[in-house]
Image (cartoon, rainbow, N blue to C red):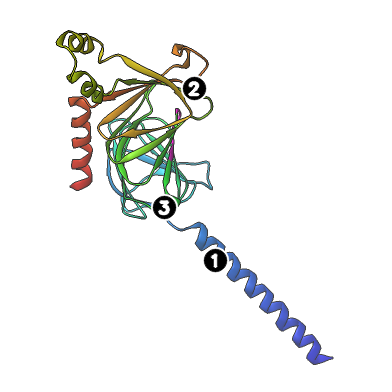
């Protein structure tokens, strides 16, 4: 009888130890860092996933699943992701680490330099106006009242949150080839029209390098849609913005 009691006690202790180890493993899994704060200029705060209270962000601090990073006026934060990708929050920006494959950008402008990934582990950035699918690229997202995405390198997919986009693109310059062999009068007529827009209604589309998008209110659409999206070539100002962020990342 005594040996049975001792056996029961030992079994209970083993169960308790197993539960403790399981709890510790769960905690370790939950505490795998998603990003490191490698530089801060000005003021930034972190809202942890398990808290309702923000604390002052510091250089060398790790960010975990569900954490939200907030930069303040005249501030900048440089992050390094687990795969060595770089992210820069400009002033008054918000970024939440939903999970390892998803970031959620709230307000402000954020620069992303994402390392190339296999398609099955592509990163998505959720914004107030679209979902961006990334496999390896360099781009800027500005969540101002008029949303903007500017792509410097690579290729990204743009997905509507709900309805279709009304997408406005300039007619492609390759049309020139179709006019080269025609009479000069026809070519002059072509030159007068070659910057006309092509309008399409799409749920998803791809943005190529050296292009930027502006997202306008849906009431400007010719039919019910998510928003009116216009594609533009880079301006000198856009190039300067990329150079500014590249300098921050490379210093």
Q: Nearer the viewer, residue 45 or 62?
A: 62
Q: In 3D space, how far apart are the residues under numbered discs 2 and 3 (Cα atoms)?
A: 31 Å
Name the mark nearer the viewer: 2 or 1. Answer: 2
Question: Which SS class for mark 3?
Answer: loop
The answer to whether 11 appears left or right of 65 in the picture is: right
How many neighbours does mark 2 have within 10 angstroms: few (below 14), some (14-19), or many (20 or more)? many
User: In the image, what residue occupies the spot 42% across and 21% down?
Assistant: 200
Vertical placement of residue 51 versus 71, above or below: below
Q: In 3D space, how far apart are the residues under numbered discs 2 and 1 (Cα atoms)?
A: 43 Å
Q: Contact (CB < 8 A) between labels 2 and 3?
A: no
Vertical placement of residue 249 versus 208, above or below: below
Say which label, 1 or 3, has the lower sequence index: 1
Examine the structure image and report whether residue 155 is included in the region drawn in magenta. Answer: no
User: In the image, what residue occupies the spot 45% across and 48% down?
Assistant: 101
Q: Is residue 186 in view from this perspective?
A: yes
Q: Magenta stretch: give its range.
A: 125-129
Task: Please give the label number shown on residue 34.
Answer: 3
Examine the structure image and report whether residue 127 is included in the region drawn in magenta. Answer: yes
Residue 132 in the image, given as x and y percentages of width and height: 41, 37
Residue under circle 1?
A: 25
Q: Quadrant of the N terminus?
A: bottom right
Question: Which SS class for mark 2?
Answer: loop
Question: Which SS class for mark 1?
Answer: helix
Task: Please give the label number shown on residue 226.
Answer: 2
Q: In 3D space, how far apart are the residues under numbered discs 1 and 3 (Cα atoms)?
A: 17 Å
């Amino acid at each position: 009888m005594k040996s049975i009691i001792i056996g029961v006690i030992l079994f209970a202790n083993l169960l308790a130890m197993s539960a403790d180890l399981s709890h510790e493993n769960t905690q370790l899994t939950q505490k795998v860092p998603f990003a490191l704060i490698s530089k801060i200029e000005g003021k930034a705060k972190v809202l942890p996933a398990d808290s309702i209270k923000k604390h002052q962000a510091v250089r060398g601090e790790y960010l975990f699943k569900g954490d939200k990073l907030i930069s303040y006026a005249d501030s900048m934060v440089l992050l390094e992701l687990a795969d060595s990708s770089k992210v820069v929050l400009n002033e008054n920006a918000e970024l939440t680490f939903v999970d390892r494959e998803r970031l959620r950008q709230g307000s402000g402008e954020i620069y992303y330099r994402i390392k190339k990934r296999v398609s099955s582990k592509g990163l998505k950035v959720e914004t107030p106006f679209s979902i961006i699918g990334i496999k390896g690229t360099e781009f800027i997202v500005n969540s101002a009242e008029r949303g903007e995405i500017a792509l410097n390198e690579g290729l990204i997919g743009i997905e509507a949150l709900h309805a279709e986009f009304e997408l406005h693109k300039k007619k492609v310059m390759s049309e020139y080839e179709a006019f080269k062999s025609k009479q000069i009068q026809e070519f002059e007529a072509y030159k007068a029209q070659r910057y006309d827009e092509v309008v399409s209604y799409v749920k998803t589309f791809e943005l190529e390098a050296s292009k930027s998008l502006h997202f306008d209110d849906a009431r400007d659409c010719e039919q019910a849609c998510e928003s009116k999206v216009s594609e533009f070539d880079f301006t000198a100002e856009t190039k300067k913005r990329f150079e500014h962020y590249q300098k921050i990342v490379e210093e």
